[in-house]
Image: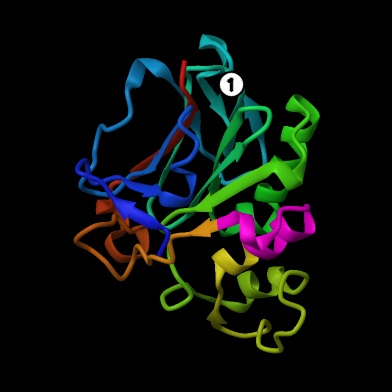
Amino acid sequence: MPFRLDERGVYRCEEWDHLDWLEHGFGTRLSEGWLPEGESADLKQVHGAAIIRAGGPASRFCEGDALITDCQGLWVRIRTADCLPVLFVDERRRAVAAVHCGWRGVRLGLAATTVRRMGEEFGSAPAHLLAAIGPGIGPCCFAVGPEVASEFREVFPERGDLDRTTTLNLEEAVLRQLEQAGVARTRVSRAGLCTRCDGERFHSFRRDREFAGRMESGIRVKR
């Protein structure tokens, strides 16, 4: 697994270690408060498809599910408790993004839309983007009814069981959507860790319902 847990209880993508101008991490239930409050853009997450360009105080408390920025020193962060946290970095343009991908966001293609938006805002080419998918609910635990499964026929055209209760692999769905957007699988790092399975390290809404906490993931370009 190309992720390691540091002394703060934060997972980092080892394949990004060569980017000495970058800071990032995927929080766990052991790392509460690891992101500085005054140096980060925040979102009211609504399980939609809105992407916010962060760059000042006015953009710090918007409604949406993805944040993008090329501002040095500004963390963009999201909170999850089973949904997939997805981080992006443009190696050439030094732009970053943090994306909250629940099943609704995946159905809407939010990760792929973020790739396109980074191209519009920063001139980011998909071939120059790196992505990392942090801990989230795995296909082992993500059982859904036909009303949800049927929404993924376009993503999983080979499956004949989407008209009934079944399981979904959201990580694989995001991977396929990123490939279609021009980001090669070889440039996407995956934690492969299920939040519902591991109650010691992760919060999980499916497991703990209203008692579930939230984990913060974030990324920034250093000053």
Q: Nearer the viewer, residue 95 or 51?
A: 95
- Give the x, y percent position of residue 134: 45, 54
SS majority, magenta: helix
**Residue farthest front in this picture:** 18
- Give the x, y percent position of residue 153: 74, 74
Residue 42 can be seen in this image: no
Q: Write down the residue under mark 1.
A: 54
Q: Residue at x 61, y 46 (%)?
A: 130
In the figure, 138 relative to 91: above or below?
below
Question: Which quarter of the figure is the N terminus placed in?
Answer: bottom left
In the figure, 150 relative to 41: above or below?
below
Residue 173 painted magenta = no
Q: Residue at x 78, y 53 (%)?
A: 182
Q: Nearer the viewer, residue 153 or 75?
A: 75
Report crowding for label 1: few under 14, some 14 to 19, many 20 or more residues within 10 A (C-alpha): many
Side (left or right) of 65 relative to 181: left
> What colouring method underlies this structural image?
rainbow
Q: Nearer the viewer, residue 117 or 50?
A: 117
- Which residues fall within the magenta stretch? 175-188
Side (left or right) of 11 relative to 57: left
Q: Quadrant of residue 93?
A: top right
Q: Residue at x 46, y 21 (%)?
A: 222
Side (left or right) of 69 relative to 22: right
Q: Amino acid at mark 1?
A: Ala
Q: Residue at x 42, y 59 (%)?
A: 2
Dot 1: element: loop
Q: Nearer the viewer, residue 184 or 114?
A: 184
- Give the x, y percent position of residue 37: 34, 21
**Residue farthest bottom in this picture:** 160
Residue 8 can be seen in this image: yes
